[in-house]
Amino acid sequence: MNELMRTQNHSYTVELRFSAASLVPCEISRRLCLQPTNSSDDFIDSPKYIKRRPFWAYNGEGMIGFQAEWQSLEEGLNFLLRQLASVQPIIIELSQSFEGVWWCGHFQASFDGGPTLSSKILSEVAAYELPLFIDNYFASEP
């Protein structure tokens, strides 16, 4: 299988996420001077429902170069890192109070590989002191 076919069978989404029972999304927005792509201040802690905590998420939508889905996880992370570089110290500070994560969706239509990341991008991601989470999804069609 050639490289073009491999990349067509895989796409990626990337975002910075914070969550916690005590999180107030507008406070994260205020501190980062960014509007979230998605957020919720609902808190459900009931055996009858799926537990859900308030969260705040940002993927750079509306910024030059934004793509809802990326053909390369590295390109998506690089884009988001460039958008957030000026607020890196605040992100690190927020991660002391809230659960922060680089959330990446990996959407695949075949089992012929997955993302590869350079040591440079791994180093940049690690500098934010947040874990990298890759959630995999399989679909029969790309």
Image: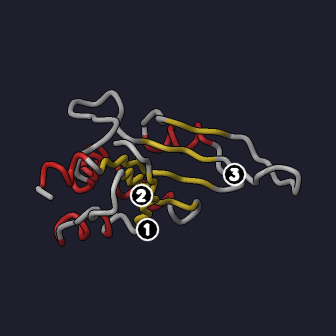
Q: Which residue is mark 1?
A: 131
Name the residue at 33% across, 27% down: 62
> Amino acid under label 3?
Arg
Label ID, residue 53: 3
Name the residue at 58% across, 42% down: 27
Name the residue at 50% across, 57% down: 94
Characterize the local packing of mark 3: few (<14), some (14-19) or many (20 or more) Cα atoms within 10 angstroms: some
Q: Quadrant of residue 131?
A: bottom left
> Amino acid under label 1?
Pro
Left-right relation of 53 to 68: right
Verify CB contact (< 8 Å) between mark 3 and mark 1.
no
**Between 98 and 37, which is closer to the camera in this rendering?**
37
What is the x, y in percent for residue 93?
47, 61
Above or below, comparing residue 31 to residue 120 in the picture: above
**Which sits earlier in the primary sequence, circle 2 or circle 3?**
3
Verify CB contact (< 8 Å) between mark 2 and mark 3.
no
Left-right relation of 29 to 26: left
> Amino acid under label 2?
Trp
Characterize the local packing of mark 2: few (<14), some (14-19) or many (20 or more) Cα atoms within 10 angstroms: many
Name the residue at 44% across, 53% down: 138
Label ID, residue 91: none
Above or below, comparing residue 60 to residue 72 in the picture: above
Label 2 vs label 3: CA separation? 17 Å
**Between 52 and 137, which is closer to the camera in this rendering?**
137
Q: Which residue is mark 2?
A: 102
Label 3 vs label 1: CA separation? 18 Å
**Between 138 and 49, which is closer to the camera in this rendering?**
138
